[in-house]
Image (tube, rainbow, N blue to C red):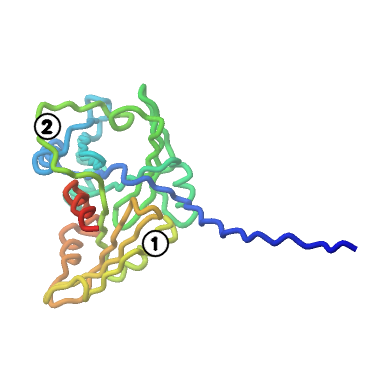
Amino acid sequence: MPTTIAAPKTKTAPAAERDFLPLQGTDYIEFYVGNAKQAAHFYKTAFGFQSLAYSGPETGTKDRASYVIRQNNVTFLLTTPMRPNHSVADHHHKHGDGVKVLALTVDDATSAWEETTKRGGKSYMEPKRLSDEDGEVVMSGIHTYGEVVHLFIERHNYRGPFMPGFRKWESDYNPPETGLQHVDHCVGNVGWGQMNPWVKFYEDVMGFRNILTFDDKDISTEYSALMSKVMSNGNGFVKFPINEPAEGKKKSQVEEYLEFYNGEGVQHIGTERVEAARHSRRSR
């Protein structure tokens, strides 16, 4: 009888884990401030931002005035309340000028909200569509530390300067740019013992991973210390270091922030400049 030889079994490579929250980067960062027009002038003068868009009473938005400024891929939205009994006014009264929104660009804002809320994220904004003659933007959002929120922005069907409800803002004052290219990271300061719970939040809810850890020996002086863990999404486009205080002879910078800001929040925004990128390439 003829001998039958079985064909060798082909080994299939394990399937790559699906990124349930694919992020394309930081869409914009919104600050709640006491005087948005003045703040926009400061960022234009000091950092070379350019005027982009405006929303306020003249565009049909009665409760706030917002100025949008941009430099390459860095976009700031500066918002001021128009009346005292308002959530923006309450935020500013408690914290002073500070970051409210870290908005992230996604392909599907509805999926982003569904995936994060089913994993334990607390909803801030259910998916909603905004539209005008330039197309539509879909946005949704979840809460994170303090009063900071993440908005998921889907804008591939929009051609306007920023989003519906805003009009193009043209200004005769346009100082030269300073080379800012994109947002590299946004640092959050949280309270004692809260770093690891928020690290777990970013791991479980948003699928991030811890790429770098600093303890109180790494970031310290004789008097002050802190601990930090850097969280990153899969492609590395979005990085959120989380800081908490550490014991020292005096208050750490994180404690001072929590005291003066009156709660947890965004400590600073790190951007990459053209010169830094060139130096990095030369050093390789």
Residue 151 found in image quarter:
top left
| Residue 171 seen from this side | yes
Compared to residue 238, the image places residue 175 above or below, namely: above
In the picture, measured across the screen, residue 105 lies left or right of residue 71, that is: right
Locate residue 67, reporting x and y percent.
Answer: 20, 35
Q: Quadrant of the C terminus?
A: bottom left
Residue found at the very far right of the displayed protein:
1
Question: What residue is shown with label 2?
Answer: 174
Locate residue 85, reporting x and y percent.
Answer: 23, 41
Residue 234 found in image quarter:
bottom left
Q: Could you classify mark 2 by the number of other residues whose Cα lies within 10 Å: few (under 14), some (14-19), or many (20 or more)?
A: some
Residue name at image x 31 percent, y 66 percent: 212
Compared to residue 207, the image places residue 74 above or below, namely: above
Compared to residue 181, the image places residue 210 above or below, namely: below
Q: Amino acid at mark 2?
A: Asn
Q: What SS does tag 2 mark?
A: loop
Numbered label attached to residue 209: 1
Residue name at image x 73 percent, y 60 percent: 7
Q: Earlier in the sequence, mark 1 or mark 2?
A: 2
Q: Quadrant of the N terminus?
A: bottom right
Compared to residue 99, the image places residue 2 above or below, namely: below
